Amino acid sequence: MRNFRYVLAALLVAAAPAAQAKVLTVCLEGAPEIFNPELTNSGTTMTVLGQIYDGLVSVSRGGSTLEPALAESWSVSKDGLTYTFKLRHDVAWQSNAAFKPTRPFDADDVIFTFDRMTDPKNPYHDVSGGNYPTFNAKLKGNIAKITKVDDYTVAFTLKKPDAAFLGTMSHGSLGMTSKEYADAMAKAGTPEKFDQDPIGTGPFRFQAYQTDSMVRLIPFKGTWGAKIGDKNRTPEVDAVVMAISGDASVRLQRALAGECLISLYPNLSDKAQIDKAPNLEAVRTKVPSTGFLHFNVKKKELENVKVRRALAEAIDMKSLVKVVYNGMGHVTGAVVPPSLWGFAKDIGPYKYDPEDAKKLLAEAGYPKGFSTDLWAIPVSRPYMPNGKRAAEMIQADWAKIGVKANIKTYEWAEYIKRAQHHEADVAMFGGIYDFPDPSQILNNYLSCSADGTPAPSNIGSWCDPKFNKLLREAGAITDKAKRTDLYHQAQEEVHAQVPVVVLGGADTITAVNKSVHGFVPAVFGSSRFSGVTVQ
Amino acid sequence: MLNFIVRKIAMLIPTLFGITIVSFGFIHLLPGDPVTLMAGDKGMTVQEHAAAMARLGLDRPLWQQYLGYLGQLAHGNLGTSLVTHRPVLNDFLTFFPATLELSICAMVLAVVIGMPLGVLAAVKRGTWFDQLSMSTALVGYSMPIFWWGLLLIVLFAGVLHWAPVSGRISLMYYFPQPTGFMLIDSLLSGEPGAFRSAVAHLALPSIVLATVPMAVIARQSRSAMLEVLGQDYVRTARAKGLAPGLVVGRHALRNALIPVVTVVGLQVGALMTGAILTETIFSWPGIGKWIVDAISSRDYPVVQSGLLVIATMVMLVNLVVDILYAVINPRIRHA
């Protein structure tokens, strides 16, 4: 009788439908370079590591407001120089075959994370190349000291006030790493494993990486997000498998075939096909990016603001944005994009007026026009999906006022290098915001230092004292309303002096299978796969 | 014979040395540098750029960098990727089985289909079959691989759902891959359906990669067969009343095979070229895609050492072929 019960039980188990594993498959556009966010600023790598690591501060899901992550709260000193973070308690670290944590996340981990990037004597400083692009570019020069106040309090003291500091801290590159894990790997003589086998506090932990093929993550049940009941930070699937598919058309085909439930960055021109597919939805995201046409103000003709204005007025921007951005762009004259605070709604594009443009050219001493080089970016970017097409349209518009534009382009590496060496007369360039602070693109693409040196991506060498003063003022205060006003004035100055023509920016689309629920693409940084369910 | 082999191996050394110069020069002559590319359109100051170049040792004169590279090679160190910070040798060993698996399948397909097609076309010379098969071979030869790959994906994966779109196995499978050959690893895994999935994923990329060699082999087989079929001994065999199948299979084909085999050997090199595009379209993690990605990101150590390792393997294959020729034909040994 007893044997019969066992047999019956076994039969019942065998007959029960096997629980279907809920696997979220995601088609990625590239392979992660490394598994430590400090060492990269690649958006693709951040998409992977954003699921594993947490920063002190994060950006709200699909939004642009800063919210607590591993820091529960923070305060800023009156002089704007000291930021004190209160750390979250009972945050568990993940584990792997080589490491089992004995303590939760605390101030020592924060100190270690930043010490590695700042102190050349830190044993990890030179491991894996020792290049910390985000930290070096945005924080290194301005951090005076980082102090452990107690086990759960850390203070960052800056050399000069930086209003964008908190925004910078939300960048995915500044994820917290485990000191205990680092010590264990150093002791084992395998420090490089620290950057290849990641240990974080996030909702998913690393299971496997098949080089250039796929990354497999599994839920970290002990993640702090689940403990505090934050659904957005709780893993809801049994695994996330990220398949690396470099070609956008292939990613779309994989989405159509159901191989990938989420396909990142399909071509904008494929939106109609996604809309038609019965199993897919094209989820549209307003990516905060700005594309420019930079005028090199050191060139003879272009140093005259009337010439720059004439060239701006000669471009039929509405047609350009409609064609080049596949109907998903926005026409604006403001440098800060509409999806970000600080956007100057009232600054529209330059009027399209070829006749007025001709008059302005004549007033500037070029009644018959002139000849100039026009550089078209060779790659597709959210701020410029089709540089060649845009250049051809601008060339045709300028021909109407007698300006002959010779379209030039270079392979991307060469383009960046030459443009940043100010070799172009007129060139397309642009950028994507990494964190929700309007200072970023204004500073990177249009500002100059106090000694008159243009910022690296200020390829037109425009150094305007009024504009730079406004930026410095806005960067030194934390009052959001006042900063908004100052950035508004700065954008008006750009509009008046025409160092650039704002070409706009396009929304991006993500092909999402209809069986996926709760996926909200990130506006800043990487999208989260926690809180996402598969039917 | 031993002298012959030693002589051949000795000749490899200056060739390898030459390859180090060419691969080093090739990647360093390309405009742009890895630091500028890593910074992207965000840019970096001149000082930041100089510091990053110094940290990577790229600020030294080229001849110093080259000597440093040779020194590394002398110690058996192929270097470490500037982008991923993984040892180049490890990555090569990861990617190579994927390319080898794909290339072997493509070559088998090309020979198994191409050769009989060419032979039949020769036997049925001037018929509709001859014209159709040779026209198809010409189309196959002229087909741009990228377009052909996408076309097959759209048709067989997108419309008919007969084959998966890309990758090496369904994303639902996860098992250790000790050999790196998916067909073998899927069998070893014991996971139900894994082997079938691996075969299904191999089908379209193999067809795409096999298309050009298949066309070349078919055309070469036809012309070689035509030449042999016109020989006196074939006519004699027919006159003796031998069955047509025996005449073609036993007498003509064996003699026609020599130039065909030579062409098959040459197609191995062509497969490497095709693999670069095929791997890109089908997200196949092989060495073709690896090198292309490294060139795009100016990952100097990967390009330098990757090309060196690939060239070494090709030379070793040639060495084996030379030795085999020498075994077959003693006159070559003494030449």
Image (cartoon, rainbow, N blue to C red):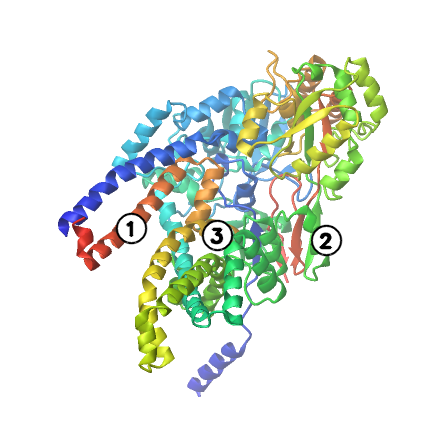
Q: Check the residue under mark 1 and report the chain it is in.
A: B
> Which residue does the image show at 73% across and 14% down from the upper left?
A304
> Which residue does the image show at 48% across and 37% down from the upper left?
B297
> Which residue does the image show at 63% across and 64% down from the upper left?
B159
Q: Check the residue under mark 2 and report the chain it is in.
A: A
**Residue mark closest to the camera, 2 vs 1:** 1
Per the model, the C-alpha gap separating discs 3 and 2 is 28 Å
Per the model, the C-alpha gap separating discs 1 and 3 is 24 Å
Image height check: is A414 above or below A261? above
Q: Position of residue A354 (x, y in %)?
A: 83, 26
Which one is in front, A140 or B136? Answer: B136
- Amino acid type at mark 2: Ala
Which one is in front, A233 or A26? Answer: A26
- Amino acid type at mark 3: Glu
Secondary structure, mark 3, is: helix
Residue on which the image places disc 2: A272
**Residue mark closest to the camera, 3 vs 2:** 3
Q: Position of residue A320 (x, y in %)?
A: 75, 36
| Picture mark count | 3
Choose the circle earlier in sequence order: 1 or 3.
3
Residue on which the image places disc 1: B318
> Which dot marks residue B279?
3
Question: Do discs 3 and 2 belong to a common subunit?
Answer: no
- From the viewer's perspective, tell me whether residue A327 is left or right of residue A86: right
